[in-house]
């Protein structure tokens, strides 16, 4: 357990599940939870025994975004204090987005504001039909600034124009159409589907998974030119020569499980 507001569970698959645990408050987060979640994610990233990280919320909501008491405190902050506060949230989002482990979000209810940012920063997202989403910041005279790089990467600039400006909510099916959610799964089947995806991920080389995540981040949006060709060729050459690459290819040719699947 990281603390009462963030639960940590480890299973025999090598998966760590982090549960936002303020169900009565719809799992809103404040500066303390942001710090705890950031620190926990960094620790998991450094642990070679951790293969997959799953993020979910307790109760009816995934996360309704910022805590109202935290927002009241923000109103009294100086500009320097507000900047430091925003940078802490930016660090959380970037830590989650760049985690070397595959990340899986399970969204069973409302994800508003920063909660949408957490969803967008994860690699795979499953949502139930009861899930709902809203980027409601402009209703408060604010903007979804810190989460915008991840949300725009997920849903595209055109859709972001609409949902950033209107602050209208949308359901799980619409979230899937936009690219924020990968699959809509019945509530009763959510955990089973998450287990299947986890096993799918665990069948793959840990270093290759990290490299594949970095590949997407580095290649997206770049022009296909000589520099990119050289970069991608170098990456695959490095992995072919690595211990994991040699083991994976050797296992495939020998028709045996690779070392990372043994046991």
Image (tube, grey):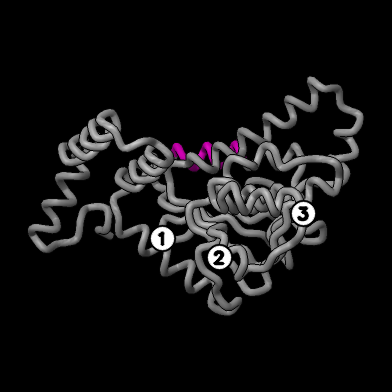
Secondary structure beneath label 3: helix
**Mark 3 → mark 1, Cα distance in angstroms:** 42 Å
| Residue drawn at x 60%, y 76% as measured from the top left | 187
Quadrant including the C terminus: bottom left
In the rendering, which numbered label is found on residue 13? 1
Please tell me which of labels 2 and 3 falls first in the chain: 3
Membership of 61 in magenta stretch: no
As helix, strand or loop, the secondary structure at mark 2 comes to: helix
Q: Is residue 35 visible?
A: no
Is residue 194 positioned above or below 226 on the image? Answer: below
The boundaries of the magenta stretch are: 38-46
* Sequence-earlier tag: 1 or 2: 1
- Does residue 102 appear to the left or right of 17 in the view shown? left
* Mark drawn on residue 161: none
What secondary structure predominates along the stretch shown in magenta?
helix
Is residue 156 visible to the viewer in this orientation of the structure?
A: yes
**Residue 63 found in image quarter:** bottom right
Counting from the top left corner in percent of width and height, residue 70 is at: 84, 40
Residue 206, position in %: x, y? 33, 47
Residue that badge 2 annotates: 177
Residue at figure coordinates x 78%, y 51% from the top left: 136
Closest to the camera, between mark 1 and mark 2, is 2
Whether pointer 1 and pointer 2 mark residues with C-beta atoms closer than 8 Å, the reply is no
Question: Counting residues from the N terminus, which is met first, the one under dot 3 or under dot 1?
Answer: 1
- Identify the mark at residue 166; answer none if there is no mark: 3
Quick check: is 43 in the magenta stretch? yes
Q: Residue furthest top?
A: 80
Nearer to the camera, 113 or 63: 113
**What SS does tag 1 mark?**
loop
Residue at x 44% of width, y 51% of height: 102
The span from disc 2 to disc 3 (Cα, nearest Å) is 18 Å
């Amino acid at each position: 357990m990281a603390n009462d507001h963030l639960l940590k569970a480890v299973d025999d698959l090598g998966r760590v599940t982090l549960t936002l645990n303020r169900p009565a408050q719809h799992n809103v987060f404040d500066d303390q939870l942001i710090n705890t979640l950031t620190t926990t994610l960094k620790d998991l990233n450094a642990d070679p025994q951790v293969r997959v990280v799953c993020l979910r919320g307790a109760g009816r909501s995934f996360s309704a975004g910022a805590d109202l008491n935290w927002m009241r405190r923000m109103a009294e902050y100086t500009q320097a204090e507000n900047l430091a506060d925003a940078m802490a949230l930016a660090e959380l989002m970037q830590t989650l987005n760049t985690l070397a482990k595959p990340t899986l979000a399970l969204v069973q209810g409302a994800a508003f504001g920063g909660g949408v940012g957490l969803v967008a920063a994860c690699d795979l997202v499953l949502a139930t039909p009861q899930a709902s989403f809203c980027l409601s910041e402009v209703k408060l005279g604010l903007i979804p600034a810190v989460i915008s790089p991840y949300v725009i990467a997920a849903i595209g600039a055109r859709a972001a124009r609409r949902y950033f400006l209107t602050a209208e909510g949308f359901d799980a099916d619409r979230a899937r159409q936009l690219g924020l959610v990968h699959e809509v799964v019945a509530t009763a089947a959510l955990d089973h589907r998450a287990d299947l995806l986890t096993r799918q991920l665990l069948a793959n080389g840990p270093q290759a998974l990290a490299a594949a995540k970095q590949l997407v981040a580095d290649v997206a949006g770049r022009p296909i030119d000589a520099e990119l060709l050289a970069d991608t060729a170098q990456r695959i050459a490095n992995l072919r020569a690595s211990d994991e690459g040699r083991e994976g290819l050797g296992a495939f040719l020998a028709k045996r499980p690779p070392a990372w699947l043994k046991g």
